[in-house]
Image (cartoon, helix red, strand yellow):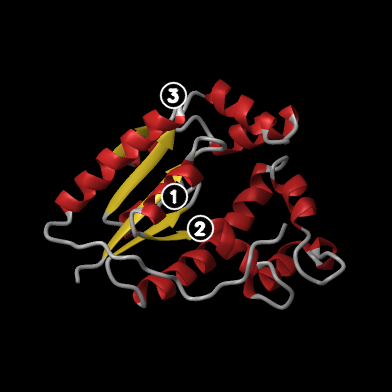
């Protein structure tokens, strides 16, 4: 069976995770970069060691894993430190995804926010971005429990989306309701199957990874 790598991206509260769920329902293997990051931030993991090198042991929580709240507060207010973290962690996340995708057959989807901005869109056969207006995404993020200040900082850190749009093969519009989004994704899935030729998509399971921290 032909193997196809799809990069799925989008900004904060744009609907990327919802689209990932619809891909899973279609039988695609979907690997969430945030889940892999959570694995890398566990006590003794490679990512934890990298961040201790950068920031010292003060970045650790009581369990000796990365204190994600402290890290977020640090990097979303300092672009230089954010880039340091991205340069250290993103290669480890991509390496783990490649390990998982290598063991799978068919379609493997990598769900990541800064996929195009990090310059690694070329590693994928097809890039999909899920988009909605910034004000709508801000309102969604606040409705989910994020403070407006935090949401604005994350939106600013992610940029205006122009790089994502330029690098995408397909843009999914998530400014409407759920049914509109489902229709958009169903159309895309049909197109992807056409692009992949005679590819048959079967339900796939990724190897076990650590559950994301809550």
Residue at the spot 32% in from the left edge and 34% down from the top edge: 183
Q: Nearer the viewer, mark 1 or mark 2?
A: 1
Could you tell whether 135 is left or right of 102 in the image?
right
Q: Quadrant of residue 186?
A: top left
Residue 153 falls left or right of residue 196? right
Task: Give the residue at the far left of this rendering.
Answer: 198
Q: Which residue is mark 2?
A: 32
Corner quadrant of residue 136: top right
Q: Is residue 131 visible?
A: yes
Above/below status of 105 relative to 153: below
Question: Looking at the image, is mark 3 or mark 1 earlier in the sequence?
Answer: 1
- Which residue has dot 1 on it? 20
Q: Find residue 79 and report its horizontal and vertical position in percent.
A: 65, 43
Q: Are marks 1 and 2 in contact (CB under 8 Å)?
A: yes
- How many angstroms separate mark 3 from mark 2 (CA)? 24 Å
The secondary element bearing badge 3 is classed as: loop
Distance between the alpha carbons at the discs numbered 1 and 2: 8 Å
Q: Position of residue 47 (x, y in %)?
A: 64, 69
What residue would you read off at disc 3? 176
């Amino acid at each position: 069976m032909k193997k196809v790598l799809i990069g799925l991206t989008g900004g904060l509260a744009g609907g990327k995770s919802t689209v990932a769920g619809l891909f899973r329902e279609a039988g695609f293997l979907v690997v969430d970069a945030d889940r892999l990051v959570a694995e890398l931030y566990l006590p003794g993991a490679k990512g934890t060691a990298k961040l201790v090198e950068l920031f010292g042991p003060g970045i650790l929580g009581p369990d000796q894993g990365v204190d994600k709240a402290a890290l977020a507060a640090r990097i979303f207010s300092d672009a230089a430190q954010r880039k340091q973290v991205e340069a250290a962690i993103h290669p480890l996340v991509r390496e783990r995804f490649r390990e998982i995708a290598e063991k799978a057959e068919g379609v493997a989807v990598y769900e990541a926010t800064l996929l195009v901005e990090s310059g690694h869109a070329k590693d994928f056969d097809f890039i999909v971005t899920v988009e909605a207006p910034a004000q709508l995404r801000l309102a969604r993020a606040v409705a989910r429990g994020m403070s407006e200040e935090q949401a604005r900082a994350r939106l600013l850190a992610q940029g205006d989306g122009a790089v994502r749009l330029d690098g995408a093969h397909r843009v999914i519009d998530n400014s409407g309701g759920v049914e509109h989004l489902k229709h958009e994704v169903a159309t895309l899935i049909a197109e992807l199957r056409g692009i992949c030729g005679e590819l048959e998509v079967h339900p796939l399971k990724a190897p076990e990874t650590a559950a994301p921290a809550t």
